[in-house]
Image (cartoon, rainbow, N blue to C red):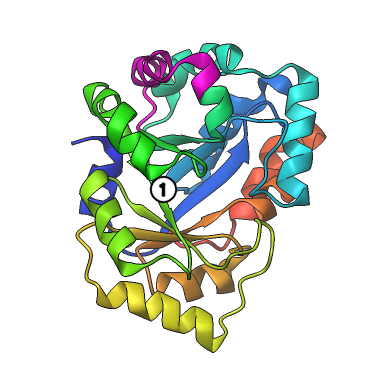
Amino acid sequence: MNRINQLFQNKNKNILSIYYTAGYPNLDDTLTIARALEEAGADMLEIGFPYSDPVADGPVIQASSKQALDNGMDLKLLFEQLKDLRKYVNIPVLLMGYVNPLLQYGVENFCKACAEVGVDGLIVPDLPMVEYEEFYKDTFQQYGISNVFLITPQTAVERIHKIVELTNGFIYMVSSSATTGKNLSLSQVTEDYFSRVAALELKNPTMIGFGISDQPSFEKACQYASGAIIGTAFVKALQSDKLEESIQGFMIGFSK
């Protein structure tokens, strides 16, 4: 059982996961932010590996990816930065990004590197499910890496059940079909979607992302899922000259 499964076994509500971009605001901030977030009460971390064409990301995360790339971030350097991760960070850590850099690095090399530094899972939104099942599932499992799939309000029930078959991690519920950074708006359509997924009584826990920006939206999401993921609002709050103060200030008020 990896750290993701242990987390959801020990805590099934109000789980707070924070996303940030590796190499942003400064190239060497990746591990510093991870340590500070755990100390400030985050339950889980999602570290984005930057890519030049982040189609699912809104302008804030796009800008952070560009800055990270301009700073010199790449996957080889990211794994070097994370080599001491488990000396300082105990909570689950996932990497999130796009399939192109993953394929260029080599899927087995990537999974092996994740296992070596203590990364627990991957979120690759544009990795087709059929390709994962046919070509990569065994490699992920060999190295103990959970693959987290995303679902949206338009995802068919049959596909959701197929995702359950293919992952031992949580299911990432995208709150809407918009890019990251849009504020969560609990319209009747959104509430129906959340309620519909909850009624399926899936064996996997669910986490809601996209549009979670503060304590009230976090609490709203937690009414329908095990927890929620905050990305854009956190990335926006980071100030390179007062990094740890920025993190502590942002995290004040969130439930542990």
Left or right, 194 with respect to 104, comes to left
Q: Where residue 142 sits: x, y (%)?
A: 22, 22
Callout 1, which amino acid? Asp
Q: Relative to residue 191, is residue 103 depicted above or below? A: above
Left or right, 24 with respect to 205, comes to right
Picture quarter with the C terminus: bottom left
The residue at the point 61 percent across, 27 percent down is: 30
Q: Is residue 238 shown to the viewer in this render?
A: no
Q: Which residues are magenta?
A: 103-120
- Residue under circle 1? 43
The image quadrant that residue 226 belongs to is: bottom left
Q: Where residue 146 sits: x, y (%)?
A: 31, 37
Could you say whether the residue bearing mark 1 is in a helix, strand or loop?
Answer: loop
Pick whichever, 214 or 183, lies toward us.
Answer: 183
The residue at the point 44 percent across, 25 percent down is: 88
The single residue placed furthest to the bottom in the displayed view is 188
